[in-house]
Amino acid sequence: DAMVIQNPRYQVTQFGKPVTLSCSQTLNHNVMYWYQQKSSQAPKLLFHYYDKDFNNEADTPDNFQSRRPNTSFCFLDIRSPGLGDAAMYLCATSRGPGNIYEQYFGPGTRLTVT
Amino acid sequence: GENVEQHPSTLSVQEGDSAVIKCTYSDSASNYFPWYKQELGKRPQLIIDIRSNVGEKKDQRIAVTLNKTAKHFSLHITETQPEDSAVYFCAASTRNTGNQFYFGTGTSLTVIP
């Protein structure tokens, strides 16, 4: 059974055209993360939610925004995609609070910017 | 923030030999250290993890060791098989910084049959 679901799996957008990536989870986890992973590189944390508490990484560009309307869903909005934003975007979840728990990754959305 | 370094970046071993990948971290408050295996085009998959109150953990052919004083941890794969070929990432996390996970730069492991 899918636990962390990402839609779409592949997204093509035009330079400067806003795009939204979706993540949902059936685990009822408190924490949801968004990572950007470029080819042959490590996943880079963009931001995460601890319940409704939003935590932005210091070097995440303003072009990237996120929304978490409820426990199950989290969205990544890229306001004006540039060619450099082409990457795999990974959503992950983990249980909390009280301790550090393992992350569960979704299958990722591969974003192409034309 | 946390800085995780990983070595080597590429590693080739003969089938049946052992592989060792090493990581160092900078934040002494980090207390959870997972290792992920990522095959091409797929999501990272947790293969083993260790917490700071433990020095070593083993799961069949995979083991992880942690030296808190030196702030380094290592992944050991014994009796390697071709299906172990993948990119391996270490990571470090601490609840103190809000449950962020910081990844090493990855090691591309090739097991030669």
Image: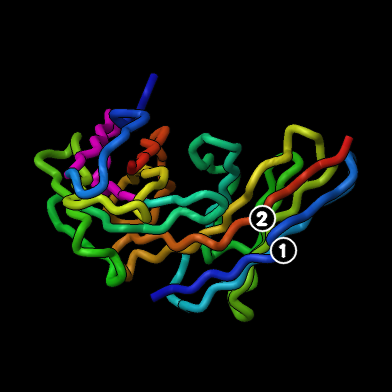
The disc numbered 1 marks a residue on which chain?
Answer: B
Magenta residue span: A18-35
Seen at 29% across and 29% down, the residue is: A7
| Percent of width and height locating residue A79 | 16, 51
Q: In which quadrant is the N terminus of chain A drawn?
A: top left
The disc numbered 2 marks a residue on which chain?
Answer: B
Seen at 69% across and 66% down, the residue is: B7
Say which of A19 and B43 sits in front: A19
Seen at 24% across and 46% down, the residue is: A30
Crowding near pointer 1: few (<14 within 10 Å), some, many (20+)?
some
| Percent of width and height locating residue B6 | 63, 66
Q: In which quadrant is the C terminus of chain A drawn?
A: top left
The amino acid at mark 2 is Thr
Compared to residue B58, the image places residue A6 above or below, namely above
Contact flag, marks 1 and 2 (Cβ < 8 Å): yes
Residue B8 is tagged as 1
Q: CA distance from mark 1 to mark 2?
A: 6 Å
List the residue tagged with mark 2.
B107
Q: Is residue B58 left or right of residue A13?
A: right
**Residue A54 part of the magenta-drawn span:** no
Give the SS element for disc 1.
loop
**Residue A25 part of the magenta-drawn span:** yes
Give the SS element for disc 2.
strand
Q: Residue furthest top?
A: A1
Tell me which secondary structure the magenta stretch mostly adopts.
strand
Seen at 69% across and 48% down, the residue is: B58
Q: Quadrant of residue A75?
A: top left
